[in-house]
Amino acid sequence: MSKLYFTKEHEWVRVEDGKGYVGLTDYAQDQLGDIVYVELPDVGTELSAGDAFGVVESVKSASDIFAPISGEVLEINEELEDAPELINADAMENWIIQISVEDEEELENLMDEGEYNDFLGEE
């Protein structure tokens, strides 16, 4: 069973079978507007929680994407290189990177869906 976790920077991570799929939240893509480019890290890059690992550019602005947890980049979503607008189409399904889950305790520092929705209500 997978579970979603969220950051205050509006990334999500879905953990399945010891791997984390990381993407932008629907709120983030909505704030960015039409996404025109996604800069992706190299497979094999080691990330610590909070590290910037890429950039998403929209017609309005460019924003760093941050790793919600520590781990190694196992895979990148290559579809985004040619079709970054997939994030606008369905932000919660179109993950950006797949990362190894090095320390499951880091997930406790993230918000679940209810906490994230409460956080959005405060913004």
Image (cartoon, grey):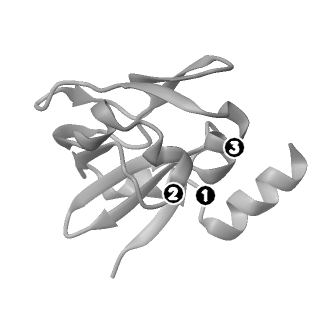
Query: Is residue 69 in view from this perspective?
Result: yes
**Residue at mark 3 to residue at mark 1: CA–CA distance:** 20 Å
Q: Amino acid at mark 1?
A: Met
Tag 2: Cα neighbours inside 10 Å, few (<14), some, or many (≥20)? some
Q: Amino acid at mark 2?
A: Asp
What SS does tag 3 mark?
helix
As drawn, 114 above or below 56? below
Q: Position of residue 23 (x, y in %)?
A: 44, 47
Judge from the rendering whether residue 36 lies leftward or rightward of residue 81; answer left or right.
right
- Between disc 1 and disc 2, the foreground one is 2
Q: Residue at x 48, y 65 (%)?
A: 4
Which residue is tagged 1? Answer: 111
Which residue is tagged 3? Answer: 30
Q: Position of residue 77 (x, y in %)?
A: 25, 43
Judge from the rendering whether residue 121 lies leftward or rightward of residue 4; answer left or right.
right
Q: Are marks 2 and 3 in contact (CB under 8 Å)?
A: no
Q: Residue furthest left?
A: 44
**Numbered label attached to residue 90:** 2
Instruction: Give 26 or 102, whichever is nearer the viewer.
Output: 26
Q: Residue at x 80, y 60 (%)?
A: 118
Give the position of the C terminus as an image quadrant: top right
Judge from the rendering whether residue 87 lies leftward or rightward of residue 63; answer left or right.
left
